[in-house]
Amino acid sequence: MENDPKITLEVFRYRPEQEDKPVYQTYEVPLKKDWVILDALNYIKDHIDGTLSFRWSCRMGVCGSCGMMVNGNPALTCATFLNKFAPGPLRIEPLDNFPVIRDLVIEMTDFMNKLKSVKPWIIREEEKPVEEGEYLQTPSELADFKTYSMCINCMLCYSACPVYGLEPNFIGPAALALAQRYNLDNRDQGQQVRMDELSTDEGIWHCTFVGECSVVCPKGVDPAGAIQRYKIQGATEWWKSLVLPYGKPKK
Ligand code: FES
């Protein structure tokens, strides 16, 4: 490891309860070809400075917990190679648009509440009896929503979204894409319930289709596309409610 070339990381350090403002601390780490940025942070933690705080778990782009700003762009640090940034230096910061708890760890309560508000589960008006068997789905019915089900809740899209940055009440890209994941599932009957919640100013209409959410998504979920589809659906519902004599149609 001593013979490896080195790269410098400028890492955001902040303990809000003790310090007035953040500082950038510089660390030199080995520049190994097979290292991702998370390996470099773990090297710092294990060998240089055990006080550095950051989140991670799976190390394989699945749990969604290692998102950070890497040279100003939201990225999963376990899925971003270090040598891409050679010769450095490389700046690592917490995800934009979220309060910092400590160093690279952000507060995610707002995001968790928003996820819950879109009712991300299958809603049935009436469950059929177990004896009648499972709800069947064809491959093309699955294909309708599969893309949106790939979200790992990493919050990179919230960090990239200028609307969420300016209007924290905006429900945001991942939660809206997740709502669409269930709306498009043929086993679900909760579209109207979700639409009542999401066709508000804080919901789909707040999105100005900047599209950065889809650019940074590490799983190709395309939240921007999901929201535009949702807008079309919302506008159609609105027209139907004007034209149909008994108000809002059921799904
Ligand atoms: Fe799980 Fe990076 S550590 S996605």
Image (cartoon, helix red, strand yellow):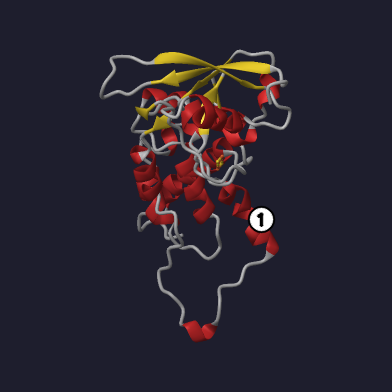
Q: On the picture, is 179 further left or further right than 82?
A: left
Q: Nearer the viewer, residue 74 or 104?
A: 104
* Relative height, residue 134 to residue 102 (above, below): below
Q: On the picture, is 206 further left or further right than 67?
A: left
Q: Nearer the viewer, residue 238 or 14?
A: 14
Disc 1: CA contacts within 10 A as few (<14), some (14-19) or many (>=20) = few
- Looking at the image, can residue 209 be seen? no
The percent position of residue 56, horizontal first and vertical second, equals 50, 39
The percent position of residue 154, horizontal first and vertical second, equals 51, 39
Q: Quadrant of residue 204?
A: top left
The percent position of residue 200, horizontal first and vertical second, equals 36, 39
The percent position of residue 208, horizontal first and vertical second, equals 48, 27
Q: Nearer the viewer, residue 132 or 49?
A: 49
At 55% from the left and 35% from the top, the residue drawn is 224
The N terminus is located in which quarter?
Answer: top right
At 32% from the left and 24% from the top, the residue drawn is 15
Q: Which quarter of the frame holds ligand 1?
A: top right
Asked if disc 1 is less than 8 Å from ligand 1, the answer is no
Q: Which residue in the rendered view is the most extreme toward the front?
A: 2
As helix, strand or loop, the secondary structure at mark 1 comes to helix
* Relative height, residue 120 to residue 200 (above, below): below
- Looking at the image, can residue 27 be seen? yes
Task: Report which residue position mark 1 lands on.
Answer: 143
Q: Nearer the viewer, residue 237 or 221?
A: 221
Count all numbered tags in the image, as a single digit: 1
At 44% from the left and 36% from the top, the residue drawn is 172
Q: Which residue in the rendered view is the most extreme toward the bottom?
A: 131
Amino acid at circle 1: Ala
Q: Quadrant of residue 73?
A: top right
* Relative height, residue 240 to residue 21 (above, below): below
